[in-house]
Image: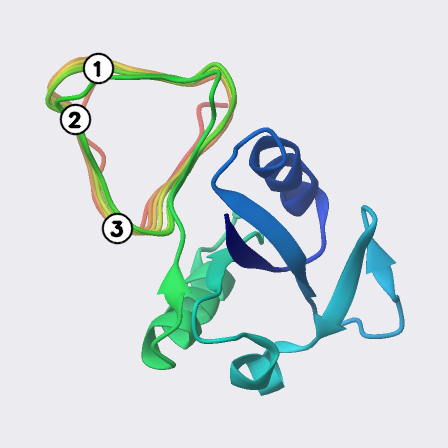
Amino acid sequence: MNNIVLLGAGGHCKSCIEIIETLEKYKIKGIVDKNKSERKFMGYKILGSDQNLKDLLSENDFGLVCVGQIKSPNIRIKLFDLLKNQSIKIATIKSKNSIISRNTIIKKGTITMHNTVINSGVEIGSNCIINTGSIIEHDSIIDDHCHISTGVIVNGNVRIGYGSFIGSGCIIKQGVNIGERVIVSAGEKIMNDIPSNTIYKNL
């Protein structure tokens, strides 16, 4: 069993811990967080901050970004790049309660939460969150550093660009292209393409 160190002690980290604890692949060594006044989080030791990350991990340890993402992916990108630039191995986490086709590509640093369904031909980039109960249908592509929130339905042949956030309960029509760093509010039905750097919300 491999040791894993989690970056960020917050709500999303709690959900990550719940999944990792059910797997037989990783043992949680501790948490890295800027708030060093707390000694433990969810029963795990706070090891230190990301300023001395390399000193906190052994050669064979894995790291995982466990900070959430809503308005901006920047913190997750910064922490992911910190792991990568310091040549720290980055874990990919798949819930036992998710259904994932063998004909998919899921890159390092991504986590699929409980009850997700990922169908054939899907490609998911690095450092993504595929959150609880979401569905990613066939041949869709999700670029790096995206968050697909709880209960989202992504139909077939959809493309979601780098660093985008799709809010809870959204439904995306087949074939739609969503640009980079797009924020889609919860509950939206996306029937047409959305350009990059857009905040999409129907009033």
The label on residue 119 is 1
Residue 43: x %, y % from top left: 83, 49
Q: Are marks 2 and 1 in contact (CB under 8 Å)?
A: yes
Label 3 sits on what residue type?
Tyr
Does 88 sit left or right of 179 as displayed?
right
Residue depicted at 42% across the width and 76% down the height: 82
The label on residue 122 is 2
Camera-nearest residue between 106 and 129: 106
Residue 34: x %, y % from top left: 71, 73
Residue 140: x %, y % from top left: 16, 25
Residue depicted at 52% across the width and 75% down the height: 58
SS category of the residue bearing label 2: loop
Camera-nearest residue between 107 and 24: 24
Q: Which residue is mark 3?
A: 162
Give whichever of discs 3 and 2 has the lower sequence position: 2
- Residue 149 vertical placement versus 2 (above, below): above
Residue 150: x %, y % from top left: 52, 22
Residue 154 visible in this rendered orientation of the protein: yes
